Every structure is written in structure tokens, then in C-alpha cells.
Amino acid sequence: MIIVYDVKTKKNPKILKLLRKYCFHVQESVFEGELTVKQLNDFKLETKNIGLDNEDSIIIYSVASRKNIKKESIYKPEKEYIILG
């Protein structure tokens, strides 16, 4: 999954902490990781405690299979991560 967010400045530390609990911080407001259905549901429930409103945004991109996605980083070498499921 790829998760991107855009929230008000005062909520930023809370959403950053929450996302780091579930995913790897890729850059600025972009995170990626492999979440189970339960983890994704837990994440969604926990966002409600942050007090997000209509001016805030969290977008989740789900990928059906690793075989159907290609990831390429240019200009900046990418860190290697081992994702445990």
C-alpha cells in the first residue's frame, strides 16, 4: 500500500506517528508498506482519534499483487527495507 496525507500543521505530528506505526516513511507525506486487512482497519479507526476534518486528506493506494507494480526511484538512491508480514 501507498498512503499519502495532507493535514493541517497542528495534526501533522499525530498522523506522522500513526503512519510510522504501520508503514515506512518514504518522503515528506508519503508512506508505503504491506498491511493486513486488520492493520488497515485499525489504522483507519486510529485516524478518527486525530480529529481530521474536510480540509484534511489521507489517500490509500492498494496494490493487488507485488507482480502488478513496478517501483522505480530516480535521482535519490532508495533505502532497502525488509517488510515483515
Image: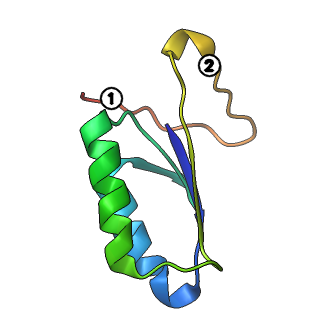
The C terminus, quarter of image: top left
Q: Position of residue 53 (x, y in %)?
A: 55, 80
* Left or right, 18 with reference to 84: right
Q: Secondary structure at mark 2?
A: loop
Residue under pointer 2: 69
Vertical side of 35 occupied by 4: above or below: below
Residue under pointer 1: 82
Q: Position of residue 35 (x, y in %)?
A: 34, 37
* Left or right, 55 with reference to 25: right
Q: Nearer the viewer, residue 30 or 55?
A: 55
- Residue placed at 62% from the left, 19% from the top? 69
Q: Mark 2 is on which residue type?
A: Ile
Return the residue found at the far right: 75
* Left or right, 24 with reference to 22: right
Instruction: Evaluate if marks 2 and 1 touch, with contact meaning CB atoms under 8 Å apart.
Output: no
Q: Nearer the viewer, residue 31 or 73?
A: 31
Vertical side of 14 occupied by 2: above or below: above
Q: Examine the image and state in which quarter residue 50 appears.
A: bottom left
